């Protein structure tokens, strides 16, 4: 059996730039003061998987605390990461990192759009302000901080830390999928 493919030169594949997508999302978010955002990377594993959605709610910069999951603008994308420390040098800024990363960077409050108040995993919605999820989020925050602050330089200690990091990650994965 033969198959034929035809192309229509009048139909062009429509591509939307990331700037346009960001502008549209920001416009919707600004009007509603909250909006769902789909996770596109694994930087916040094990809590946030690719395809999960987070409900981002507008907050004042002074209301962002240690452990909050925020969304902020980077030049060409929106990033969802965790706050591991606040800075008040020359205005308000935060030390943020992905739970699945060992490095952290400072982000100014002017780039922060809001913080996550809920997570959608498939058909399930997790409210982050419940007692159980506040505890789990605190544990994940402490784990994320320890990975950043306790980075050993010694190769033997680095292997030991990596071993415990991988074991803890498996435990967190298990806990999060069971809840």
Image (cartoon, rainbow, N blue to C red):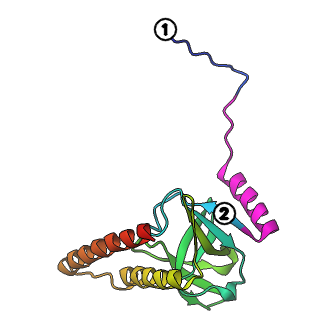
| Residue 145, position as x, y percentages in the image | 42, 83
Q: In this view of the protein, can residue 177 be seen by the observer?
A: yes
- Identify whether 123 is placed above or below 170: above
Numbered mark located on residue 2 in the image: 1
What residue is shown with label 2? 36
Q: Which residues are magenta?
A: 12-34
Residue farthest to the bottom, as pictured: 88
Count of numbered marks? 2
- Identify whether 40 is placed above or below 148: above
As measured in the structure, the alpha-carbon distance from the residue carrying label 2 to the one carrying label 1 is: 45 Å
Numbered mark located on residue 17 in the image: none
Q: Earlier in the sequence, mark 2 or mark 1?
A: 1
Tell me the SS state at disc 1.
loop
Tell me the SS state at disc 2.
strand
Majority secondary structure in the magenta region: helix
Q: Which residue is nearer to you in this view: 15 or 58? A: 58
| Residue 156, position as x, y percentages in the image | 17, 78
Q: Residue at x 49, y 59 (%)?
A: 41
Q: Which residue is nearer to you in this view: 11 or 139? A: 139
Q: In this view of the protein, can residue 73 be seen by the observer?
A: no
Whether residue 28 appears in magenta in the rendering, the answer is: yes
**Other-residue count near label 2 (Cα within 10 Å), few / some / many at <14 / 14–19 / ≥20:** some
Mark 2–mark 1 CB contact (< 8 Å): no
Find residue 30 and report its image quarter: bottom right
Relative horizontal placement of residue 21, taking residue 65 as reference (left or right):
right
């Amino acid at each position: 059996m033969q198959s034929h493919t035809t192309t229509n030169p009048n139909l062009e594949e429509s591509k939307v730039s990331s700037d346009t997508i960001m502008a549209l999302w920001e416009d919707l978010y600004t009007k509603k003061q909250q909006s769902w955002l789909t996770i596109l990377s694994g930087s916040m594993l094990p809590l946030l998987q690719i395809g999960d959605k987070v409900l981002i709610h507008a907050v004042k910069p002074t209301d962002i605390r240690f452990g909050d999951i925020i969304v902020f603008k980077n030049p060409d994308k929106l990033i969802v990461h965790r706050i591991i420390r606040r800075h008040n040098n020359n205005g308000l800024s935060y030390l943020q990192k992905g739970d699945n990363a060992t490095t952290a960077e400072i982000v100014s409050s002017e780039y922060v759009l809001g913080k996550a108040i809920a997570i959608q995993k498939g058909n399930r919605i997790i409210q982050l302000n419940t007692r159980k999820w506040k505890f789990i989020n605190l544990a994940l925050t402490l784990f994320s901080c320890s990975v950043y602050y306790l980075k050993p330089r010694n190769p033997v200690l680095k292997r030991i830390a990596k071993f415990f990091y991988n074991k803890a990650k498996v435990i967190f994965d298990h806990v999060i999928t069971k809840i």
